[in-house]
Image (cartoon, grey):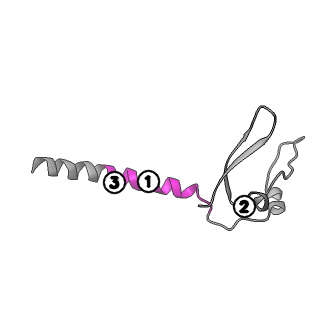
């Protein structure tokens, strides 16, 4: 009986923190449709002297890119997900 009561207290204390974590995670997920690459580029605010150029877009990747890395030979490797 005491164990059940202790478990209930622990759950009730942790619940607000779990809800806050879910809300924080939801803020990291884009809730609007993606724009074409050219329009996305216009949204960048770059410091003076910097420029931006499109290297690859979704049409070359076929799915959602989640990681980018250059190897020792300067090649770009991309991992993707279909999620």
Residue farthest toward the front in the current orientation of the protein: 73
Left or right: residue 2 versus residue 35 is: left
Instruction: Give the residue drawn at x 32%, y 49%.
Output: 14
Marks 2 and 1, how far apart at CA: 34 Å
Which numbered mark, 2 or 1, is in the foreground of this view? 2
Q: Earlier in the sequence, mark 3 or mark 1?
A: 3
Label 1: which secondary element: helix
Q: Quadrant of the C terminus?
A: bottom right
Left or right: residue 78 versus residue 74 is: left
The residue indicated by pointer 3 is 15
Q: Earlier in the sequence, mark 3 or mark 2?
A: 3
3 in relation to 42, above or below? above
Label 2: which secondary element: loop
Q: Percent from the top left, x then y, of residue 57?
A: 79, 57
The residue indicated by pointer 1 is 20
Instruction: Give the residue drawn at x 90%, y 40%.
Output: 49
The magenta segment is 14-30
Residue 17 counted in the magenta span = yes
The residue indicated by pointer 2 is 62
Instruction: Give the residue drawn at x 79%, y 52%.
Output: 44
């Amino acid at each position: 009986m005491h164990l059940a009561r202790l478990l209930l207290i622990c759950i009730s204390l942790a619940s607000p923190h779990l809800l806050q974590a879910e809300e924080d995670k939801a803020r990291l997920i884009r809730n609007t449709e993606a724009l074409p690459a050219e329009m996305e580029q216009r949204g960048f605010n770059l410091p003076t002297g910097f420029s931006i150029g499109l290297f690859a877009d979704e049409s070359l990747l076929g799915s959602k890119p989640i990681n980018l890395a250059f190897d020792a030979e300067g090649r770009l490797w991309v991992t993707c997900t279909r999620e």
